Image (spheres, rainbow, N blue to C red):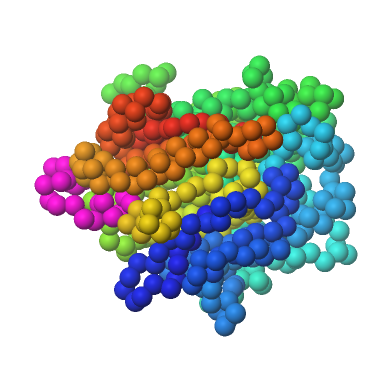
Amino acid sequence: MARRNGGATPGQEALPVQPVERPILCSPYEEPRDHWIYDKETGAASRAGTRRPASYWYKTERTGSAQLTLTGLAEEERDDLPLVNALREDVRKWREAGYPGATNVTRDLLRHWWRADRARRLFFCQLEAVETVIYLAEIAIPGRRDKRRNYQLSHEDLARLLRGERPSFSPAGQEFYPRLIDPAPDPALAPLRRLASKMATGSGKTVVMSMLIAWAFSNRGQNPATALFPNGVLICCPNLTVKERLQVLRPERPDNYYEAFDIVPLKYRPLMQSGKVLVTNWHRFAPESEHIEGGKSYAVVNKGPETPDVFARRVLEDLYERLPILVLNDEGHHCWRPAPANEELTGEEKKALEEEALEARVWLDGLDRINNCTADPRANPGISLCVDLSATPFYLKGSGHPEGRPFPWIVSDFGLVDAIESGIVKIPRLPVLDTTGRPDPKYFKLWKAINENLEPGERLPGKSGRPKPEVVYREAEGALQQIASQWKERWEQMRAATPGQEHVPPVLILVCDNTDIAEVFYQDQRRDGDGDGHRSRGGRSARRGGGGKRER
């Protein structure tokens, strides 16, 4: 929620602005009707009275259609996502009209998910994300929209997006424009049809995946002859930890989400067995050695490179017989195509980018191979639809794309600020000064401030030049003490709350650059006697308190 104050003197870093004390404006179960606007000169907040348009904050280059005007100077660093905003309007009208064109199964599922008397109600952001994908996959893309109606996303622009061409609402001359395909580097290969749902971490992406699988399998089970609804789903994820967590999406599991979250009505649950879910991680897409036979390596064996068909059979196993399949990319921001880059990176940035680029290249190359494993991939691709779910579907620094540029196939957007204002996730805070009550500027970009002001002897030897863990702790200790004191104050308020008052406990999470640094912070938390540690991707996090977040 923190924004920067634009009233700083030239050459001085703009000061962060602490958000309003109670930022929640909307219900998590209804479409947002309000949002906060922060004045960049004063930091004052005012209510807009409307839903926040889908947009993103950019650093160097605009990609949407927002124009700089005298009345819009306060948001010169924001640009819109016109495709998402157009689809919001079309999906809302489709919903209000009772989902015309959808199958009876689809209408039953959507009405079941919207029920207000559910034991575990679904968030609006989950419902909108699912409705948008279903609207495109079942109604708009197959040409089942009423030709007599006017749509924000016109028939002509939809056709352009599916061909990877510039739509009419994208200004001419801009390099970036939205599209609904991801072309392979080799123009001879069929492109992936790709959609992305941007959802804040903690807003329930796994449940959204379960809803999409239920939509596909229930419809296919009711009408086995149709290929419009896949009966095979490949879920791709970044690591083994996430892979294990996503096993709940397999319908045969006793702890599956379809029953736990009441995703499928009782009358349709037998239909879920008509489909199959395979959960894997990107490592499985790495090409197999030409010398491997029967799981063992032999010097005398040389089978040659895997063809797309052989690759697809190995990776998909019996899911291969269910082509075309639906692909769900969990944490889909890891799945991007590197472009030629001219940026200069530090040794640490370069190493991190090389790891990310390898993952992205193997991941997407594997999907391209599966998509092109059929006899006629352009007419009958191996992947009917690829859906990304991510909180950050943006390109990285050094990727060859402008840093922070959104993926062009984003079709729905419910970001962190929206999730905070709807009361879905925790409210982040910044360390503040006791004297002013304002955030301390030196703690606004703490890792950058530490990393850029170290003496040579305070770095580890070697090419990486990483800061020594104990030095990082020394420099970060002041910020930790400030934010921990705020945590303690809020914890005591929660414990003293009477019935009827808010009892949501605060959580303090420390995210470190690597496991060595995290270990130093973790041991400090253990010495305090009330912390517990858990590993996370890229490092270890130390956590105080817990609970309070609505789990979906």
Q: Where is residue 206 in the image (x, y as percent from the top left)?
A: 61, 35
Q: Magenta stretch: residue 155 in it?
A: no
Residue at the extreme bottom: 70
Residue at the extreme top: 254
> What residue appears at the point 73 percent right and 31 percent down from the top-left corner?
120
Q: Where is residue 319 in the image (x, y as percent from the top left)?
A: 61, 28
Q: Position of residue 409 (x, y in %)?
A: 59, 55
Q: Magenta stretch: residue 463 in it?
A: yes
> What residue appears at the point 57 percent right and 25 percent down from the top-left corner?
247
For the C terminus, which image quadrant? Answer: top right
Pick the front one: 360 or 319: 360
Pick the front one: 276 or 14: 14
Decide if residue 221 is on the left or right side of residue 254: right
> What residue appears at the point 71 percent right and 63 percent down from the top-left corner?
49
Pick the front one: 73 or 138: 73
Task: Decide if residue 338 is in sight here.
Answer: no
369 over 18 or under it: above or below: above
Residue at the extreme left: 457
Pick the front one: 333 or 549: 549
Choose top left, top right, bottom left or bottom right for residue 15. bottom left
> What residue appears at the point 38 percent right and 57 percent down from the top-left corner?
435
Total numbered labels placed on residues in the image: 0
525 over 466 or under it: above or below: above
Task: Decide if residue 534 is in sight here.
Answer: yes
381 over 16 or under it: above or below: above
Report the magenta residues as a range. Answer: 446-465
Q: Position of residue 518 (x, y in %)?
A: 31, 35
Decide if residue 435 is on the left or right side of residue 462: right
